[in-house]
Amino acid sequence: MRNINNHTMGLSLDKSSLNSSKDNRIVGTVNLTGELHHKSRADYTRNITSPLEELLYSIYDCTVKQDKKGAKEKYIYLNDEFSIGKENIPEELLLFFLVVKLKYFMLVNDKKLYEPTYKQIDVLSTSLNPSIEYIHFKTLGIYYYRTDNFLQSTLALEHALNLSNKLPFISDEDKAELYYQVALTKIKTSDSFESIYYAEKALAIYQGLYHNKRSAECHVILGINYNYSKRFELAEKHYLSAKNIGESIQDRYLESMALNNLGEIKSYMKQSEEAIFYYLESLKLKKGEERSVFSILGLVEEYYILNQKEFSKEWAEQGLSLAERINLKEYILHFTTHLYLLEKSDKIEDYILNQVLPYFRSAGNERYTNKYTELLAKYYYQNNQFKSASDFYNSCLQNIKSKLAY
């Protein structure tokens, strides 16, 4: 391993094309011209001052392109060739190094390294370099989203958006990733209009770049928003687009995600049998992996609606076991609350008041805050605590009105 101060190399940024081969063009409707290719390269010109900084930008670019193989190769090279520490690197470059590490860990979904890396970043000052600051806050926005802190995600992404409007060297795909993440976070905070706006901006770019997977994920975001606003035909159209892309590129993740969300449409339309069908089809593709909790929760709720309490309980117990095994706090709360509901346990009041609502309020998750506020209101009403029921129903109403005010 060489000291970074003495290390020289002719490393250049990855010049590979951002779009798939022409034989695999599925989502695009606009031909990529030479002008677009030139723009993508020109926009990526940065004022790079050292081989280490160039390598860090290169790793970051791989994460933007979702290139796990390329990012891994460069990250291994980084660890092998550079000795990096507070004693031999300027603080601004150390910050950039740690931010890129966090971005890489999120690309490969190494959750054990999220928090330790974030803690190292958190004690450092922000950068005076606007390019590094943009990457810093964009990465924090993704980190906060992944760790269920949607209020902080919103703030970090707003700062990244402001910076992106001032920087001339951000590629189209980089902007698309930012818009995509903003759209995701806005779902959690119930800002559907903004979520749709940014999802459509991201989709337009990804379609132009023939980035099929991310295009499909944008379709899912749009479908979720249209589903929540009861525009079911539009929602179904976007989910089917995602499903078709998943089938075309043989991506089981995309297929399962589209099927799960088609189940959500049927649930909203009070078609529980069809919802259950889609949830089960989605589960077949997931094979017990982490994302299975989404479809399991759907099954729990649909069987409860159909008054098939034993099936609902069995799925809730299975979902809780999976959520506890992989430490998914949100779903531990969902399944535990539902089990208390099924058992008619008096523990449900304390659990919602002291565990569930504080968690979702702190995260800025408006949708689930309202859901469990309403559930608690129903609990009070059924137990003849009409004053408390009225207070919690009113709280739900005020939350909804605050979102409609603008």
Image: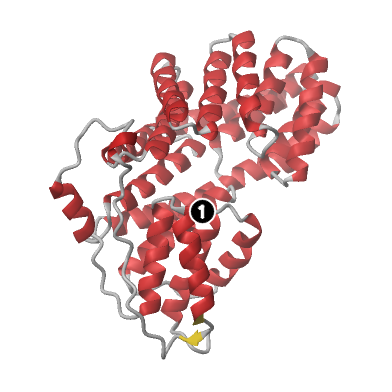
Q: Is residue 353 visible?
A: no
Question: Measured from the top left, where is residue 358 in percent x and y?
Answer: 67, 44
Q: Is residue 15 visible?
A: yes
Does 21 appear above or below 282? below
Q: Is residue 145 left or right of residue 294?
A: left
Q: Position of residue 185 (x, y in %)?
A: 47, 43
In the image, 245 versus 393, the foreground residue is: 245
Left/right of residue 204 with respect to residue 180 in the rendered view:
left
Residue 229 shown left or right of residue 329 in the figure: left
The secondary element bearing badge 1 is classed as: helix
Q: Quadrant of residue 322?
A: top right
What's the amino acid at mark 1?
A: Leu
Residue 367 falls in which quadrant of the image? Answer: top right
User: Across the whole image, how many numbered discs are drawn on residues?
Assistant: 1
Judge left or right: residue 117 versus residue 337.
Answer: left
Q: Which residue is mark 1?
A: 107
Q: Quadrant of the C terminus?
A: top left
Taking 141 as reference, is 333 above or below it?
A: above
Report the front residue among 212 and 301: 212
> In the image, what residue occupies the spot 17% across and 54% down?
38
Residue pictured at 52% horizontal, 28% vertical: 255
Asked which quadrant contains residue 19, the reply is top left
172 or 379, which is in the foreground? Answer: 172
Which x, y percent locates residue 16? 31, 55
Residue drawn at x 59%, y 18% is 278
When the figure is inspected, residue 337 is found, relative to residue 112, above or below; the finding is above
